[in-house]
Structures are given as structure tokens and as C-alpha cells.
Image: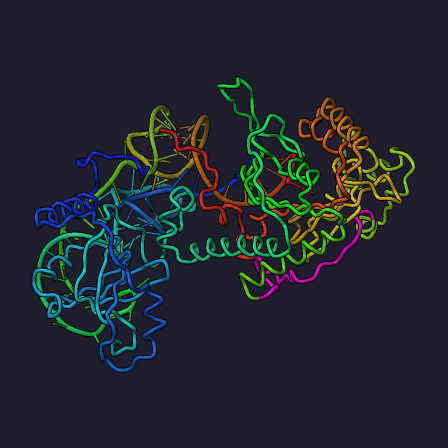
Amino acid sequence: MAGEQAPVEDLNEMMRVRREKLETYRSMGIAPFGHRYDVTYHAQDVRDEFSGIEDEEEHGNVRLAGRLMAIRGHGKASFATLNDRTGSIQVYFKLDVLGEEKYAQFRLLDIGDIIGMQGVVFKTRRGELTVKITDFELLSKSLRPLPEKFHGLKDVEIRYRQRYLDLIVNPEVRKTFEARNKTIKAIRRYLDAHDFMEVATPVLSTIAGGAAARPFVTHHNALDVDLYLRIATELNLKRLVVGGFERVYEMGRVFRNEGMDVRHNPEFTSVEIYQAYGDYTDLMDLTEEIVRHAAQQVLGTTVINYQGTEIDLGKAKRISMNDVVKEATGKDFLSCRTVEEARAMADELKIPYEQRHGIGGILNAAFEAKVEESLIQPVFITGHPTEISPLAKRNPGDPRITDRFEFFVYGRELANGFTELNDPIDQEERFTEQLQQREAGDDEAHVMDKDFITALEYGLPPTGGLGIGVDRLIMFLTDSPSIRDVLLFPTMKPVAE
RNA sequence: GACUCACUAGCUCAACUGGCAGAGCAACUGACUCUUAAUCAGUAGGUUCACGGUUCGAUUCCGUGGUGGGUCACCA
């Protein structure tokens, strides 16, 4: 489709015309692909500085550069719209001002061309702040027609595959990615201000641990070994806490070889944070503060409207998984003494479970089936079963559950954290259990990481850890229905040749 | 992976139970020195996603494939 090199004779009418104009410029001695241009003002600068001017008096002398988005011709005078990174501004080309030769050059311009121009600022009779152009320069000829100005570009396939077009013609898309940038900056600034050190750990490794997920596999030729793309940053970050970096975080891409839908992309951005001498309650506080801070920085409020539902990110309830399941179903799974009892409860509620599930696994299945999607307002679910939490420390009062939380908003997991398991003997047993799960057919069970055990044997201080799904947070802050709307280049199947 | 919906001009969309594929914007020609979805007159632009089938005739019906959206499954 668009994007491939087409021989000139195959081009459609509009592209042929543009190439002809390009040759016309060349024959006039004008390079259709120019060089640097000294920009002194952006569209927004003009608005900021001159919006107070009255009448049609001319003010200032400004040099702007950007893309021509519309041309409204009137014979010997024409208005046009120029877009730059700050927005758009109306510009005015006038034969009297530019002279015959320059005005003729203007008439060869197309929508989409990139122009440098200088002029004076005035207000039209209708009150529109406008730059009267005294001179201009073609900086880049655009050889393809842009999508329509009024309806924009709607075809989601083209929007994702050719994001540059989406960004040119759909201003709200630019806003979304500006909000993404603000969110990421807000998270960084908050953590930096609280003495967390940002680190970078390997994306490529021989063991993909720290989460339950299938990894992508690749091969290193020189070493002749298979390497995995990381599925989490967890284990390396905890190694760094062992090493004495008491507060570390990493914001970066992780990769999971799984299905795709509105909430999942094969590569996504997480931020994982570890705080020595803290526990999961500290990390719940931190989660709230980070989310609140990001919302304030991006939106100026913690109250969002997501897909028509008002949600206050500023306050979250806290309730244990077993209690919330009990509220929803009347069943107290943790009162079960045997798996058989738990299975009977699940059967009664018509909740499906696997044979390999213990009481904890069945409790989790009940939570997912009966509770999860109803958690619209922010809530921390705590006390996850040890069985499904192989890296979390056991609750001192009940070894069947852990000191863990998941943060839910709009029925979706936004963050996950716990008091880190720092007992190497318990950790080794948990990994061994995971291996058994793997042998029992769960190909997403955690893998054994012996060096991680070794690190724990040297001593990991009591530590709280947290992971936030950054893309999902941005979805909430930008009211985006799909994760693809907050990824500049979402994963797409290639177009068949 | 399963189900389902969609794919028509550069873009946004029409085309009844199968009967010559159309509009707006964009483009081109002309008019127009304050328009802003500028306006007015005219012109051109199509492998209707691809391949096969049914039919006198297929954008329309059937099959296979492709890509995309949604739901589910899987999964954080």
C-alpha cells in the first residue's frame, strides 16, 4: 500500500501533478527540498505575544516554519493555515506584498508542503490573528496528498501503520502522545525527588524471570546461545537492592509473547520500583502517590472520565482478596481445610478451575470470575494466595497468603506490588513448585533462577516492590479505549506482498 | 486460536430484493485582494482487498485467502 516505491508512471493524478510542480520549482532555480531555516516564533508564540493587538495594525516581524494544512485562495490574495509543533496559525499571502514572482511561487504550493516564512502580525476584520507573509521559502515539497482536512483520518489501520499521517491530521492524537510524555516525566520526577535511582538492566538474558509469561526467544550468533527478551525487570532490580542500592527503579519496555487485545501489546512499558526497609503497605501508598501525581501533572485533577465513567484516582479502598470474594459470593475460601472443600465451593458457584490449582488458585479463580471486572473505582486487593505469588513474602499470620496487592481501576490491573520474598530457602522451594507447575503443563510458570537464589543468600533487606503498567495508566489519563492508541507504533501484522 | 463485523476514488462516505459505481473534501482549468469546512462555474479521477464460483449480468450471493476492528480464549 502507500509507502512503497511506485514508478512515476504508476502514480495517480495527484502525485503526478505534485512531481511536476517539483520540477517546475527546479526549473525556476528553487530547491524543492531546502535546508535550515531560522525560526523565531511558533504559532503559539504569536498567539501569546500578539493576541492583545487591536485593529489591523501590523506588529512584529516573525519567522515561522511548518506544514501547510489548508489554502483558501482568493485570486490575488490567499489565506492558508500553517501547523507547527505548537498548533496552527493563519497566514496571509498577498500579491501586493509579495510581488508577481513570489506570488506565482506561492500558487505552486500544495497542502502538505513544509514552508519557512516571515511576516508581520495583524488581526483580520473577523478578529483572526494572522501573519501577513513578506517572504517565504519552500523547505520540503510534499509529494502525496494528505487525508481530508475536515473528517481527518479515521481508518484505524492506516492510523496505526502510518502514524505520521495520523499525527499530521488528527490533533487529538498529538495531544495523547504529549500526555504520554508528561505522564512518564511525572513518574520519573516523583521517583527522582524521593531518592529512587533509575537504572537500566538487560533486555536480553538467558533466563526470562520475574513474571508468569511466555518470552520471545532470539539467538546470539557469537555466543551461540538462545537469549530471551525480558518479561519483567524484577529479579535484576532486587539483585541491585542486594547490592546496596536501597531505592531503585526502572522504566522500560518488557516483552511478552501472548495474545493482543485492547489492553495487551506484545511490548509495553512498565515501571518497577523497589524500596528497601519498606513493605507492601508503603508501596500501596507510593502507588497512590505516583498515580495521583501523574494525574495532577497531566490533567490538573485526579478525577478522570474514562469511557463515560467518572473515576477518582485520588483515593483507593483496600480490601483482601478473600474478603472481596466473600462479599461477592458469600463463600469464605480461606476457611477451607482441604482442596476438596474449595473445589466444592467453586463448583457451587460454577467457577472453572484447573486440577493443579490448590485452595489459593481456586480463590484466585473465584476472584477473577466473580469480582475483578466489577472493580471500577480504584481499589487495592491484598492478600493474594502464596500459590499464585511465587516472589512475594508470606503473610506472617497466614502462610497461605502473601503480603501482596494489586491495584485495580475500571476492572483492570494497573499495578502489582508486594513485600519481597527475601528468604532464599523459601524462594528456592517456590521456584521448585513453579517447575512442577511447568511440568504439569503451565508453560507460563516461573523459571528457576539459581543466581537469584544466590543473591538472596547474601541477604536481601526487607523490601517492598511495585510494578505499574505505564501504558494502562496513560490510557486512563487520555481516555483511550485501546492500548494501541497510546503506543506510537503498535505491533501490527505485516501486509502481505 | 475461535466467533463476528468491515474493506468502494488520495481521504470521509453512498449505491434498494443482483441491472451501466456516486457525492463531499482533495486535485486540475477558470473567476475572485479579509477567507477560515471560503465561494462560484467547469474537468478529470475506480483491478469496488485478492483469487475462484453461481448468473445473461456480481460492489451486492457463495467459497477460499489477506488485513483491520470487536468479543471470547490465552494472558497481567
Q: Position of residue A48 (x, y in %)?
A: 36, 72
The stretch drawn in magenta includes residue A12:
no
Q: Is residue A139 left or right of residue A251?
A: left
Seen from this angle, which residue lies furthest front?
Answer: A244
Residue under the point 29% across and 50% down = A146
Q: Position of residue A394 (x, y in %)?
A: 82, 40
Residue under the point 50% across and 53% down = A180
Q: Is residue A144 visible?
A: yes
Q: Position of residue B70 (x, y in %)?
A: 54, 45
Residue under the point 73% across and 43% down = A368
Q: Is residue B38 left or right of residue A184?
A: left
Q: Of residues A430 and A491, which is closer to you in this image?
A: A430
Residue under the point 38% across and 50% down = A166
Q: Of residues A252 and A26, which is closer to you in this image?
A: A252
Q: Is residue A148 left or right of residue A232?
A: left
Q: Position of residue A362 (x, y in %)?
A: 80, 37
